[in-house]
Image (cartoon, helix red, strand yellow):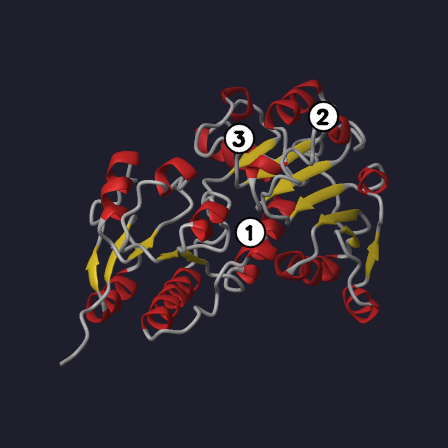
Amino acid sequence: MAPPRLKVVVTRRLPEPVEARMRELFDVTLNPDDTPMGPEKLVAAIADADVLVPTITDRLDARLLGQAGPRLKLIANYGAGFDHIDVATALQRNIIVSNTPGVLAEDTADMAMALILSVPRRLPEGAELMRTGEWTGWSPTALMGHRIAGKRLGILGLGGIGRAVAARAKPFGLEVHYHARRRVHPEIEAGLGATWWESLDQMLARIDILTIHVPHTPSTFHLLNARRLKLMKPTAYLVNTARGEVVDENALTRMLRAGELAGAGLDVYEHGHEINPRLRELPNVLLLPHMGSATMEGRLEMGEKVIINIKTFADGHRPPDQVVPSML
């Protein structure tokens, strides 16, 4: 007699091939209308599920996890980041947490590079002129941006995504600089042509473009605060495709409005989809709707990782992408 299938609850709509495979393997409850679950629905989901598959839009804090039923043994997150999950509380309740790392480095690096190229060359302003029909023809002085080649690119965090950005930046003639908690191996530095800065403050004062590639943790919250942002040149640009909470969004907005920074390209925001309205008004800012990982290939690979984590757990083994305390 076959063992009963795991009861799996998925909080958001996933790509159809992923959902189809889940239906084959598990007793799965899907979210066909893709409306984010509020706290009440999440509590109902974790009350009698064996596995919850959440996304970044689901906040699983200690209070909510405290209402989990005895069946819940795995939170198989659809995404690499897990700062929306109180992992410590989950572990205290013997609930394993897994994620989907190592999938989106190339996709996110592509998006970061697109922003690095777009904002200094004033692509958002040019596109707006064309959209509104206000363009009256070419002019020798219109929409003059800045050349990329020869500029100093500062990379905050040189993990998989940071390295992928560095590899893309070098052929464009950018000088690659980086700050990270630990210096990478000299061979990696040499291959990327990257210069390490032990001091983030010193790096910020010398670069022309900053791109952020660190996770959101207690130690990185507002890592780019008002004091550090003021270290940057007024001609510098900031790009963020990592986590919005790393940057003090109000301080960034004030500096952009005051001309203390030249521009920004943002795909993530400190308060999720609630964006500072003053930020929306700035012509030197390109705002994207958290689409750094939005490729069919990447999202399918994320789904495959979720399924492997659940299937491995169901077979009595440790999920390959289990989040462990040392990662917190």
Up-down: is 274 above or below 162? above
Question: What is the secondary structure assignment of the residue under circle 3?
Answer: loop
Question: What is the secondary structure assignment of the residue under circle 2?
Answer: helix
Question: What is the secondary structure assignment of the residue under circle 1?
Answer: helix
The image quarter in which residue 299 lies:
bottom left
Residue 84 lies left or right of residue 250; in this view the side is left
> Which circle's residue, 2 or 1, is located before the other in the chain?
1
The image quarter in which residue 233 lies:
top right
Q: Quick one: 180 or 190, which is closer to the camera?
A: 180
- For the N terminus, the image quarter is bottom left
> Which circle's residue, 1 or 3, is located before the other in the chain?
1
Of the numbered discs in the image, which one, if any, rests on residue 135?
3
Residue 177 lies left or right of residue 55; in this view the side is right
Residue 184: % across, % down: 77, 62
**Residue occupied by mark 2:** 226
Disc 2/disc 3 C-alpha distance (Å): 36 Å
Up-down: is 210 above or below 109? above
Q: Residues within 10 Å of mark 1 (few under 14, many from 20)?
A: many
Q: Quick one: 199 or 288, which is closer to the camera?
A: 199
Disc 3 marks which amino acid?
A: Trp
Q: Residues within 10 Å of mark 2 (few under 14, many from 20)?
A: some
Of the numbered discs in the image, which one, if any, rests on residue 111?
1
Mark 2 vs mark 1, foreground winner is 2
**Residue visible at 48% across and 49% down in the picture:** 87
Residue 34: % across, % down: 26, 45
Disc 1/disc 3 C-alpha distance (Å): 27 Å
